Image (cartoon, rainbow, N blue to C red):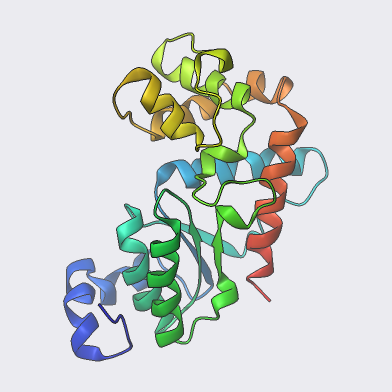
Amino acid sequence: PNLSADAATLLPIESALGYSVSRHLFIGSGHHLAVEGSSDFVYLQRFTEHMTSKKRKGLDPRLSIIPVGGADNLPAFVALLGRRLKVSALVDGARTASRMSRITAAAKNNGVPESSIIAIADIPGMPSNGDVEDLFAVDDYLRLYNWAFGSSLAASDLASTDEPILKRVIDLIGRDFDHALPAHALTEHRAEFFANVDPKTVENFAALIAKLNTTLA
């Protein structure tokens, strides 16, 4: 659907979100970064803390991260917030192309610069359908997965393909899993994780964070 600034189009969304109340309670007048879910939020927070501890620039504190509860909600949030507030969005996942087209259309129709929409695929070396988890070196992500699920997966267990890490893990175990749990494992084991983190993982997140920071311009 065309997520334009038409009041009739967005009124049901505003009603469902309680927007007139929520913008005063938890959505300020600053610049907001819409992300798919809690794992994106946690990863950006943890890597910002790590980079800051190393005297490097993390995510600009002016960007307020809002997990929107799933990729399918991103276009509506960009349309809704973009009507009144400054908003950026982080897009990832297997349907990146179709997601991007819907989100950029929502942005264009509501005065949000297309440069404010950032995809994981924009980061050098990432697959075109990459998820935020693909920013991790494989061994780093599997450490988080193993902590979260009490397993012992190794990189050698995964198919040697260019598919996103989530798909390769799902293909191996034969089912989907809660993607938020490895993110929570990072919070629980942050000192141990960052003591042995692959520099490539840090550089990938640094590249993403730098791109997100440019959306403030």
Query: Which image quarter is the C terminus in?
Result: bottom right
Which quadrant holds residue 109?
bottom left
User: How many marks on residues?
Assistant: 0
Residue at image location 33% in from the left, 31% down from the top: 178
Give x and y (percent) for residue 54.
81, 38
Vertically, is 43 above or below 156? below
Query: Which image quarter is the N terminus in?
Result: bottom left
Vertically, is 59 above or below 102? above
Give x and y (percent) for residue 107.
44, 79
Q: Residue furthest right?
A: 55
Vertically, is 160 above or below 3? above
Residue at image location 64% in from the left, 72% down from the top: 216
Which quadrant holds residue 13?
bottom left
Which quadrant holds residue 191?
top right
Residue placed most toward the observer, 111 or 21? 111
Q: From the viewer's perspective, is 109 left or right of 118?
A: left
Residue placed most toward the observer, 45 or 151? 151
Give x and y (percent) for residue 9.
21, 84
Q: From the viewer's perspective, is 30 left or right of 206?
A: left
Residue placed most toward the observer, 63 or 149? 149
Residue at image location 57% in from the left, 14% down from the top: 156
Residue at image location 50% in from the left, 20% down from the top: 158
Give x and y (percent) for residue 84.
41, 84
